[in-house]
Image: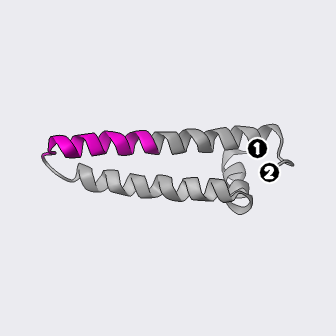
Amino acid sequence: MKEQEVVENLKKESEEFRKLLEEHHSLEHLLAEIDKKVYLTPEEEIERKKIQKQKLAKKDRMAELIRDFKRNPHVN
């Protein structure tokens, strides 16, 4: 099964995956807004790093769910 098919299945079947995907997109949007600024205050830099870490954690968990689904598609 191709990765995109797995993602589509998880979007249909997994509430956790849908939530992670939604949160990941939301964090992506926040980063894009921050990155529009020419200069960031130290507080904004810290916030940007925090958002990047949260976004990466969500992406890592989604990748884990995808791997699990590929190993055993009937459990999810």
Task: Sort mark 2 into few (<14), some (14-19) or many (20+) by Cα contacts within 10 Å.
Answer: few
Per the image, label 2 sits on a secondary structure element best described as loop
Task: Return the residue found at the far bottom.
Answer: 12
Which is more toward the observer, 31 or 44? 44
Q: Is residue 61 magenta?
A: no
Q: In which quarter of the image is the N terminus?
A: top right
Q: Residue at x 27, y 56 (%)?
A: 33
Q: Does the magenta stretch include residue 41?
A: yes
Which is more toward the observer, 35 or 5? 35
The total number of labels drawn is 2
| Residue 24 horizontal/vertical position (percent) | 48, 52
Per the image, label 1 sits on a secondary structure element best described as helix
Q: Name the residue under label 1.
A: 69
| Residue 53 horizontal/vertical position (percent) | 41, 39
Q: Which sits earlier in the primary sequence, circle 2 or circle 1?
A: 1
* Region rendered in magenta: 39-54
Q: Which residue is drawn at 41% across and 53% down?
A: 27
Q: Name the residue under label 2.
A: 76
Which is more toward the observer, 19 or 4? 19
- Given the image, on which type of amino acid does mark 1 rest? Phe
Please, is residue 24 above or below residue 48 in the view? below
Task: Sort mark 1 into few (<14), some (14-19) or many (20+) by Cα contacts within 10 Å.
Answer: some
Mark 2–mark 1 Cα distance, whole angstroms, equals 7 Å
Q: Residue at x 25, y 49 (%)?
A: 35
| Residue 13 horizontal/vertical position (percent) | 74, 59
Task: Return the residue found at the far right.
Answer: 74
Instruction: Assign the magenta stretch its main secondary structure.
Output: helix
- Given the image, on which type of amino acid does mark 2 rest? Asn
| Residue 11 horizontal/vertical position (percent) | 67, 59
Disc 2 and disc 1 in contact, CB within 8 angstroms: yes
